[in-house]
Image (spheres, helix red, strand yellow):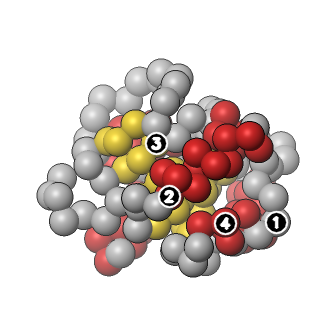
């Protein structure tokens, strides 16, 4: 990708689909691996370990990493019961745009999708996208938003 692309930090629970999403968006082969450290993918996406959200002691690491990005993507698996995002979570990023991305939509019911979107809206997402990194569903809309950022 071009170096002029905006940098987006992905935050979400372990197995929410952050790494698979970055693989899809950067045309990489899809394969699961556990993200152990912050990884910069294609110079644009900052993939964070799920533990950074799951353990409040790592919130400082999220804040420091966020200082180097243009937007925050909060990621919620549609098939996950519950959410790790506190209400207003996005406010900790000092006014940076917060986008919500519901993943694994190919595996979810409409009720699950609506619930996931509500979790992200409560966390501070200003806009939400529903995507599947397996089928590609919803990726065109997300890509348009990324290009306009």
Of labels 4 and 1, the one closer to you: 4
Regarding residue 122, the answer to whether it shows in the image is: yes
**Is label 1 in a helix, a strand or a loop?**
loop
Disc 3: CA contacts within 10 A as few (<14), some (14-19) or many (>=20): many
Q: Nearer the viewer, residue 96 or 100?
A: 96
The image shows residue 93, relative to residue 102, as above or below, that is below
Q: CA distance from mark 2 to mark 1?
A: 18 Å
- Return the mark for residue 66: 2
Q: Which residue is mark 3?
A: 47
Q: Which mark is residue 87?
A: 1
User: Does the residue at mark 3 contact the one at mark 2 (Cβ under 8 Å)?
Assistant: no
Along the line of sight, the residue nearer the viewer: 29 or 120: 120
Residue 77 in view (yes/no) = no
Q: Secondary structure at mark 4?
A: helix
In contact (CB < 8 Å): disc 2 and disc 4? yes
Residue 84 location, x and y as percent?
A: 78, 48
């Amino acid at each position: 990708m071009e170096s002029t692309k905006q940098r987006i930090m992905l935050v979400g629970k372990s197995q929410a689909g952050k790494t698979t999403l970055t693989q899809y968006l950067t045309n990489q082969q899809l394969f699961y691996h556990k993200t152990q450290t912050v990884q910069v993918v294609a110079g644009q996406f900052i993939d964070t370990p799920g533990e950074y959200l799951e353990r409040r002691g790592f919130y400082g690491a999220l804040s420091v990493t966020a200082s180097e990005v243009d937007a925050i993507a909060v990621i919620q698996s549609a098939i996950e019961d519950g959410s790790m995002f506190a209400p207003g979570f996005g406010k900790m990023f000092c006014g940076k745009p917060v986008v919500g991305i519901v993943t694994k939509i190919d595996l979810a019911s409409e009720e699950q999708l609506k619930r996931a979107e509500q979790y992200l809206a409560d966390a501070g997402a200003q806009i939400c996208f529903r995507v599947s990194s397996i089928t590609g569903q919803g990726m065109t809309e997300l890509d348009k938003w990324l290009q306009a950022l």
